[in-house]
């Protein structure tokens, strides 16, 4: 199962710090800029990998030179600079400066590229190149020519907010929840990459709504137990308007509110199927009901039995097995 791992160069002997940092990035060739010494090198990384091959990371590091186009590189990098800057150099005359104002920057790891990162902090998502080729071939063609910034639009703002949200929630994300979060980040990134074409067809507009719907459903699954969760908070978390969220759910069997209500009741049912479930008051609180009586009525309408009866029947079934 996916889990975040934290790494810091200060955890090893000073003379080993940069070699340790290199070992964390086997698909990128790293060097120290002239004048920088390994024994005073400071860098930190928080990273998680999904079973689908995506890698999410948040790193801060002292000045570092990086060289892409290694034999074992086979990913497309979507990055967001938070602080400092990165100076990109491709060929003899192609140079770009990436800062926090550059937005989401895309590069193809197979293309020869040098980067000088200076007091740099960034979020990144490494997506297997095969997935980008299959779902966003035009973006891959662009990246093969030169790194580029994704346009500033509703979807890229949503993606930016989502990547930042993963960092904020990292201490509570692990296992299936983290897998779900990384899958949603990949879904949104692939649609944003597909939309980086000059023109956007109706087909891709539909894909955007589908991506927002999937992201909203995953967000609801992760946060359904938060008592104050409602349509406005879901829309804010995904970086879209409430009207945009409602439009995304037009192709869904249930509305946003109905999906949230159903998810909460299903999660409550799962918690009742344990030897020592939470109290009815606790369950009603986490399901957003004002009192236990309202929760009990809603649960019985959904599953045909009260919470107490459901737990008793589950215990009886367990004894029969």
Image (tube, rainbow, N blue to C red):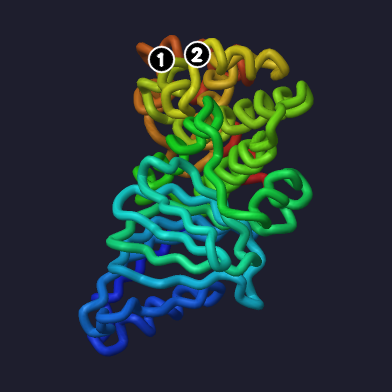
Is tag 1's residue or tag 2's residue first in the polypeptide sequence?
A: 2
The residue identified by callout 1 is: 289
Residue extending furthest toward the bottom = 15
Residue sitting at x 42%, y 11%: 293
Residue sitting at x 50%, y 13%: 242
Q: Position of residue 159 (x, y in %)?
A: 51, 36
- In depth, the one of 95 and 298 nearer the eye is 95
Residue sitting at x 41%, y 51%: 98
Q: Which mark is residue 185?
A: none
On screen, residue 74 versus residue 105, left or right, reads right
Q: Is residue 52 visible?
A: no
Residue density around tag 2, few if under 14, some if 14–19, many if 20 or more, within 10 Å: some
The Cα atoms of the two marked residues, 1 and 2, are separated by 22 Å
- In depth, the one of 25 and 138 nearer the eye is 138
Q: Position of residue 200 (x, y in %)?
A: 71, 27
On screen, residue 305 versus residue 37, left or right, reads right
The residue identified by callout 2 is: 242
């Amino acid at each position: 199962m996916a889990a975040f791992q934290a790494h810091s160069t200060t955890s090893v002997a000073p003379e080993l710090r940069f070699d340790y940092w290199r070992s964390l990035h086997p698909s990128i060739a790293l060097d120290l800029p002239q004048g920088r010494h390994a024994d005073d090198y400071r860098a930190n990384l928080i990273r998680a990998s999904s079973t689908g091959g995506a890698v999410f990371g948040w790193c801060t590091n002292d000045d570092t030179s990086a060289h892409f186009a290694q034999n074992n590189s086979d990913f497309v990098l979507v990055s967001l600079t938070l602080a400092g800057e990165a100076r990109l150099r491709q060929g003899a005359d192609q140079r770009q400066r990436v800062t926090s104002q550059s937005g989401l920057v895309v590069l193809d790891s197979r293309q020869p590229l040098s980067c000088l990162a200076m007091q740099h902090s960034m979020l990144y998502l490494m997506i297997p190149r095969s997935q980008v080729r299959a779902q966003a071939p035009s973006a891959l063609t662009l990246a093969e020519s030169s790194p580029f910034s994704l346009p500033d639009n509703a979807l890229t703002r949503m993606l930016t907010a989502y990547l930042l949200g993963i960092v904020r929630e990292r201490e509570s994300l692990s296992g299936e929840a983290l897998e779900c979060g990384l899958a949603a980040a990949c879904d949104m990134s692939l649609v944003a990459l597909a939309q980086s074409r000059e023109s956007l067809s109706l087909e891709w507009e539909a894909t955007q709504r589908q991506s927002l719907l999937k992201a909203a459903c995953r967000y609801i699954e992760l946060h359904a137990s938060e008592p104050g969760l409602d349509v406005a908070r879901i829309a804010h978390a995904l970086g879209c308007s409430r009207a945009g969220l409602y439009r995304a759910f037009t192709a869904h069997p249930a509305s946003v509110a109905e999906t949230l209500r159903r998810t909460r009741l299903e999660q409550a049912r799962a918690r009742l199927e344990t030897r020592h479930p939470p109290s009815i008051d606790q369950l009603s609180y986490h399901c957003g009901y004002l009192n236990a009586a309202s929760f009990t009525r809603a649960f019985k309408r959904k599953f045909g039995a009260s919470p107490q009866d459901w737990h008793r029947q589950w215990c009886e079934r367990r004894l029969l097995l």
